[in-house]
Image (cartoon, grey):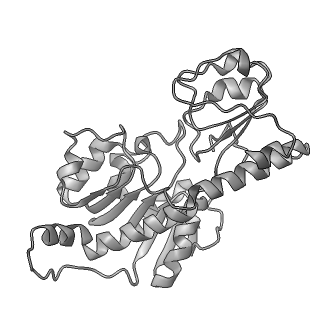
Amino acid sequence: MKKIEELGYEIIIKKEKNLTFNHELKDVEILLCYNPFTTLDIKKMKKLKWIQLSSIGIDQAPIDYIRKNNIILTNNRGGYSIPMGEWIVLKILELYKKSHQFYKKQENKRWKIDTSVLELYGKTIGFLGTGSIAKEAAKRLSGFNVKTLGLNTNGSSTKYFDKCFSNEEIKEMLTLSDVIVLSLPYTEKTHNFVNENIFNMMKDRVFFINISRGNIVDETALIKNLKSGKIKGAALDVFENEPLSNDNPLWSMDNVIITPHNSWVSEMRNQRRFEIIYENMKKYSNNEKPNNIVNLNRGY
């Protein structure tokens, strides 16, 4: 806070939970936050010019109002990409090496060799989305002698990917991939993007990983394809409803690894988050364009 004050800012610190508008906030020009929007009515903050989110996702923000009032919206893009890239590699290996099942054997003190363990070498990893998280994962996968494919809007060539496909070429990419990693941003267009039709395009016995948002996947279709074996195994960090309800069948599936929206966490998260925020506040104080401005029409 002292470093930010040294840039010439006056700082007001409030807890986000149940935060409501009061007289102290009426002259606020910049809002640094995660999600106070369920209780804080930013329409009353008449001098608000810029919102800096501590998250990568922006679906918690009142986008229509922000767009209408020409408020700058920036996010924490890149701030969590390294630990999430590592998490993707970890879960791919755990699915191929059947770690989930071995941990259960260890808990039960059961000594039994499993000859169905697979190797990652020579496999093809397909990423739905080629943003910073996908790039960090693809970069780390390069040492495993795998082929990395990416899907983005126009099939634009992207660093660390062997080949990229456009949205219109999704079927071709899916049929080539042994593992599908979902790393798309959540927007109106990507809601339930991975549905029964998309699962049908995938290889039989494919592995599926989601670090994006649960609502991008039709969870009913996912469960169906896990039960049928079309999806050999899945590692899921995000879900349609969080926390995941106790009666959700995903909990008890032997071919599913569940983590509680935890892939972004590392000991460096606060440091990187501060560095992004501080650099943007320095730019803003110098009347420069901040980094990570969200394209409100695209939604990311």
Quadrant assignment, res 19: top right
Q: Is residue 224 left or right of residue 50?
A: left
Question: Along the line of sight, which residue is nearer the eye, 253 or 40?
Answer: 40
Which residue is depicted at the point 17% across and 51% down?
252
Residue 290 seen anywhere in this rendered image of the structure: no
Q: Residue 265: percent from the left, percent from the top?
A: 49, 56
Q: Residue 196: percent from the left, percent from the top?
A: 32, 47
Q: Is residue 68 left or right of residue 127?
A: right
Which residue is depicted at the point 65% across and 68% down?
157
Which residue is depicted at the point 60% across and 31% down?
61
Q: Quadrant of the C terminus?
A: top right
Residue 243 seen anywhere in this rendered image of the structure: yes
Q: Quadrant of the N terminus?
A: top right
Q: Is residue 128 left or right of residue 13?
A: left
Q: Residue 65: percent from the left, percent from the top?
A: 67, 23
Q: Residue 87: percent from the left, percent from the top?
A: 44, 65
Which residue is depicted at the point 67% across and 33% down?
13
Q: How many marks?
A: 0
Question: Along the line of sight, which residue is nearer the eye, 239 or 111?
Answer: 111
Q: In the picture shown, does residue 70 fall above or below 234?
A: above
